[in-house]
Image (cartoon, grey):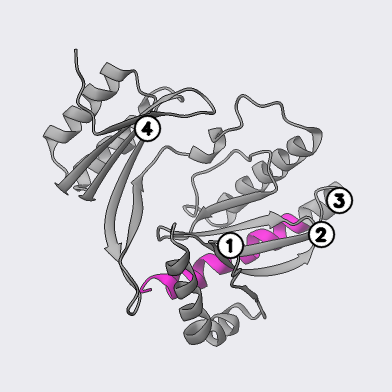
Amino acid sequence: MTWNVDLDGKDLTTGHIIIIENQLKQTNHSHLGQLLTYAAGRGAKIIVWITRQFKEEHQQALDWLNDNTSEDISLFGVEIKAISIDESKPAPLFNVVSKPNEWQKTAGHSSKQVSSKGEAYRAFWSDFLFELKEKAPGLTKASKGLPQNWCHIGAGKTGYAIGAAFTYDSQFKVELYIDAGNKEVNKEVFDRLYEKKKEEIEQQLGEHLSWERLDSARATRVALYTNGSIDYDEKELANLRKWGIDNLIKFSKVFGKAIINL
């Protein structure tokens, strides 16, 4: 039998089949049915539905499926539109409206042996997320840390993330990370924030920030630093978590407002 899915592929890390269904108009029941039929026919584990606009009932359907299917099944709902800043060329902007809870927990780590330092990172971020959700319920649904030196959550707008990270020169930071998938757009967004909102943002945060345009990279960031290492003792790590959580919550509030109309 032929299954006429728009795009398919394979996750090279896990070998899982990926299918992508594109829809030019608003979502409808027909395409939802097609998506599930294609997924069953291909044995897909990662299922992506891209459209101009999601109806509430179809977003809820994907959310329900993510909550009630096995952990190795992941469904994504993605809205796409074109954006331009000032006179730049239009670039695609993808807004993920539905995804599995704690998607990042399985992204490439499940089949790899984790080092002792990786386990230390995993434990730190698990505690970090637990304490973050206690202080700011609803800010993130993630609860399991990954064996890596950073942890990001959404910033309320596709292409932006707010998070915390250990650096390789024994510093710990909270940051706004900008990567809309297009270098030119990222730099223009950064420039607009810096030129028009820097003073206001720093006044609201009560901190002087590090504005990092990163001209040789695609992404950009705005960060706040303190000394910190995963090799600290437990008391020092607890202090780092508190510092990171307090400032991440501030970043989320201040930058969430600043980027909403960009």
Closer to the camera: disc 1 or disc 4? 1
Measure how far apart labels 2 and 4 are at the Cα level.
39 Å
Disc on res. 232: 3
The kind of residue tagged 3 is Tyr
Provide the residue span drawn in magenta: 240-262
Which label number is shown at residue 169? 2
Crowding around mark 2 (Cα neighbors within 10 Å: few <14, some 14 to 19, many 20+) is few
Q: At label 2, which amino acid type do we have?
A: Asp
Disc with the residue nearer the chain's start (3 vs 1): 1
Tell me which label, 4 or 3, sits earlier in the chain. Answer: 4
The secondary element bearing badge 4 is classed as helix
Q: CA distance from mark 1 to mark 2?
A: 19 Å
Query: Within the magenta stretch, is there residue 251?
Result: yes
Residue tagged 4: 66
Q: Residue placed at 30% from the left, 66% from the top?
A: 90
The residue that disc 1 covers is 217
- Label 3's element? loop
Where's the N terminus, which quadrant?
top left
